[in-house]
Image (spheres, helix red, strand yellow):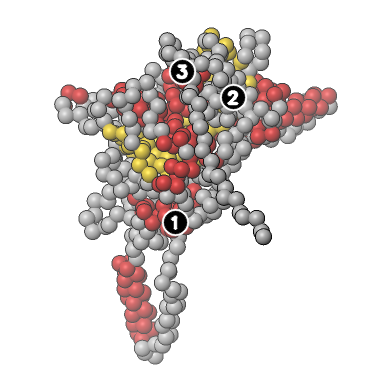
Amino acid sequence: MSLRDRLLAALADLPGTRTFHLHVLTSSPRKHNGLFPYAHPRPRAYLQDVFILLSEQASPDSSRVLVTAIEASVYNIPATSCGVLYVSKVDSTGHAASPSPTATLVRAFLAYYADPVTRPVSVRHLWIQLFARAQGQYLFPNSAEYEGKRPLSDVKLCGWWKRIFGEVAAEVEARLKGSGAIKLYYILPGFAELEATHTLGHALSRSSVSGDSSVTVTWTYGHPYSQTEIPLPCPRSQDAKEEPHLGLFIPWFDDDPKSRFIDEIAHTTNSEGVRSPKRKRARGLTGSGPTGETRAVKERNEEDEKDKEKEKDERPRVQGELGQVSPDEFWERMSFRQECVAGAVTGFFAMGVSMPAPVDASQKTSQPSPLAPQPGQLVPRLVRRIISTLMNHHEFSTRERAVRATETLEGAIKGLCEDDAPVIPAAVAATAATTTTTAQSVEPGPERPRTPEPRQVEPEVPRTPPPGRSHLTASGGAVPEISPNPFPDPVASPETYTSFIYGSIEVRNPPLPPRGTVGAGATNGTNANGADGGSGQVARGAPAAAPSAAVTVLQVRKKRKPAAA
């Protein structure tokens, strides 16, 4: 089952009457050497971009409007048979009907990669990581100005993500039936375990939400870099003398506070003090003739070579202070970072899913090359172009603007698969049309040469540049990825669009019972828009809840002071 079909099947259970339109964009794998930039040698990894757009249509006569978007990255490390799914952004517009489909879509997306049966990456171990930080908008520009959008607060957002992770882990564990291992970790920087549990309340205390009460998933408050049950993505060095350092544990993701902090640690040198400059050598000659000058030059060259070899031997292979900071100290110092102590509660969440190696040789099958494109995948530049167009040329502050942006963006995705046409935003298209009309009115003669129109180049997605990016460039000593890809780039076609990218489903279910009615409390919590929702399924045939008995509240009687004489 493809990712598109899995997401549509999950959306079919939502209550209410509406139609969902889904676009799933997955790029072909490409080589990537920046996941662990401070490991020597760097592990070979392959990267894929995943971008999901969900639009909703209330009735056949109404217009579509985007409601949810997910941006994620999938890393494949064959050396350790590990995969990493990093969820970078999840956002909603606030235009969805109640209950919002965001929670259901995110839950199905994570379960698709966590389940070894449906996982599209050939790895035995998978890590899902994300950084939760509450903001008004992430992917939909100006959507925070829409009065119908109610973003979750910092505490509720962390509780929402923990509940989603717990539900996915419980679902996968029930399917594995004890044949694998699942671990859940979370950290709220600046909070102890009891403080985190008390701050997030009941949403964090629930470790599992599943129909089978026997399935429970234990949460660990801390980081996963001290455990040995599930292998970590970065392979260990084959040199027995080299001790593990921080660069082998912390992965490097775009726009992630962990990446910015590890960059600072790696580029912090001379912590013991400032070194004195090297003493200059005297420029004396050992002789007055040409023979003396030649001997002096030769001796200087030999001394320079000895100094270079000595510096090379003394130079540590571990960059900066990576060898002096342990993972426990890293997370302790993370609590003092500005991104984590700016007055809002933030959280780091991780899930590890591991499957044992097959014992029978017949179960071992030959796997295709990690670079081989699969059906339905696109060239990475097309996925980045769609993301750039969404974030730079559209806005969702009103219903009308959101509908117009939905039509333009969905039409652009379909046009890319039909004739590989470039994505031109509405403003640029209007300018181009005006220029064409003016050119036709004053068209020069055939003998006069014409200047070609400048080519429109789409800008890249804006990202926060972390300090010290020299380690990812050739000038900083990194080995550039110059090995060619033996496989040709996938070609988008109308068949790719209809079979793998676009899909729709018409939902015709009973509406969600209003609050306060019997049985209405069986909904699955709060969705990303802040309205109570989730799956919205109510248990049928359950007995009505008995009325609660009256509770007598005792109060302390204040002692009266005697009257003054």
The percent coordinates of residue 291 (x first, y second) are 35, 85
Nearer the observer, 198 or 11: 198
Pointer 3: residues within 10 angstroms few (<14), some, or many (20+)?
Answer: few
Relative to 350, 88 lies left or right? right
Residue depicted at 36% across the width and 89% down the height: 287
Q: Residue at x 34, y 77 (%)?
A: 303
Task: Say if 104 sits above or below 322 in the image.
Answer: above
Task: Residue type at mark 2: give it.
Answer: Val
In the shown orientation, is residue 157 left or right of residue 108? Answer: right
Residue linked to disc 2? 67
- Label whose residue precedes the other's in the sequence (1 or 2): 2
Q: Can you tell which quarter of the image residue 281 is in? A: bottom left
Crowding at dot 2, Cα within 10 Å, few <14 / some 14-19 / many 20+, comes out as: many
Instruction: Place residue 137 in its image quadrant.
Output: top right
Q: Is residue 306 visible?
A: yes
Q: Nearer the viewer, mark 1 or mark 2?
A: 1
Which residue corresponds to mark 1?
333
Cα distance between the residues tagged 3 and 2: 35 Å
Residue 545, numbered circle: 3
